[in-house]
């Protein structure tokens, strides 16, 4: 897949600053700030307090979760993926998962490894990996935007594989939710599925709902573009109206530039 969902994580604050402190969420729901944490094989945590002098151990079951700033191994894997070296990136994320899965980076490593596998054309394997997170028990609310990205990637991979029922199960959750961007994404992708099935009028209706129901979401320019395209193909006179709307409201969008290429 050429289009990655990392920008979503950047916008939502998932790409973290190295200055962020490591924390252990204790059983009384407090964040204990520490200078370093290391996960031990038995699930306990070895940590150093802020003064950096005394090491202590907290057994598994005595903490809710732990979180550290992005480790250098994961940052290096990100660089490999962005440099389009997906085979090495996938291996790097897999190794990092084992080391940092108890330190807040389990979901991120699975998500990014799945992106790398998709780049390699191994979409079935990528979906299987993402499916590990279907029943993920969210306890660290920092991961909410990341789990959204996981679901979106899972949807797109299933669509690419022609597994529309699996994609629709996820999309139905999105369209019934309260988050406008997720709901817009849900209607947009439902339209993509209908279009792949040759149901152009039904697809146009899904794109139209995305346009009319969600005014301030990133998915709207794409929905307008796809609506214009389908209406043009079906010789619907309303195509020009929505094309004008796209150009007027999103003059700098890449979708506008496709529909209205600059004259040389």
Image (cartoon, rainbow, N blue to C red):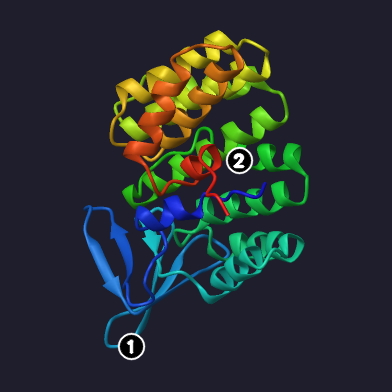
Which quadrant does the C terminus fall into? bottom right
Label 2, secondary structure: give it: helix
On the picture, is 60 further left or further right than 169?
left
Where residue 137 appears, as percent x and y from the top left, is 43, 39
How far from the left and from the top, in percent, is residue 251?
Answer: 38, 45
Position above or below: 145 against 76: above
Classed neighbour count for the residue bearing mark 1: other residues with Cα under 10 Å, few (<14), some (14–19), many (≥20):
few
**Near-viewer residue (34 or 42):** 34
Looking at this view, name the residue that lies furthest to the bottom: 53
- The reply to whether dot 2 and dot 1 touch (C-beta < 8 Å) is no
Question: Farthest residue in the front direction?
Answer: 264
Residue at 34 percent of width and 80 percent of height: 35
Marked residue nearer the N-terminal end (2 or 1): 1
Numbered badge on residue 130: 2
Question: Foreground mark, 2 or 1?
Answer: 2
Q: Nearer the viewer, residue 117 or 136?
A: 117
Q: Is residue 108 left or right of residue 126?
A: left
Residue at mark 1: 52
Q: Quadrant of residue 25?
A: bottom left
**Residue 55 percent location from the top left of the image:** 38, 82
Residue at x-position 53% and y-position 20%: 190
Residue 40 place in picture, x, y as percent: 53, 68
Q: CA distance from mark 2 to mark 1?
A: 37 Å
Specify whether 191 is left or right of 253. right
């Amino acid at each position: 897949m050429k289009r990655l969902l990392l920008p979503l994580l950047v916008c939502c604050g998932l790409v973290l600053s190295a200055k962020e402190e490591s924390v252990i969420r204790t059983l009384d729901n407090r964040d204990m700030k520490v200078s370093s944490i290391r996960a031990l094989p038995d699930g306990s945590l070895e940590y150093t307090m802020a003064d950096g002098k005394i090491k202590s151990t907290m057994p598994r079951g005595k903490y809710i979760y732990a979180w550290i700033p992005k480790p250098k191994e994961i940052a290096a894997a990100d660089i490999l993926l962005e440099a389009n070296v997906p085979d090495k990136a996938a291996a790097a994320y897999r190794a990092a998962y084992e080391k940092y899965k108890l330190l807040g980076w389990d979901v991120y490593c699975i998500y990014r490894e799945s992106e790398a596998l998709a780049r390699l054309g191994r979409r079935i394997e990528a979906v299987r990996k993402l499916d590990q997170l279907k029943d993920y028990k969210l306890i660290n609310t920092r991961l909410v935007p990341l789990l959204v990205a996981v679901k979106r990637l899972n949807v797109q991979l299933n669509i690419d594989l022609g597994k529309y029922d699996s994609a629709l199960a996820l999309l139905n959750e999105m369209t019934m939710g309260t988050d406008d961007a997720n709901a817009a994404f849900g209607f947009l992708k439902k339209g993509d599925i209908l279009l792949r099935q040759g149901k152009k009028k039904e697809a146009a209706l899904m794109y139209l709902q995305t346009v009319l129901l969600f005014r301030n979401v990133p998915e709207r320019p794409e929905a307008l573009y796809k609506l214009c395209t389908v209406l043009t193909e079906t010789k619907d006179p309303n195509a020009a109206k929505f094309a004008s709307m796209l150009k007027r409201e999103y003059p700098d969008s890449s979708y506008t530039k496709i529909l209205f290429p600059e004259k040389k």
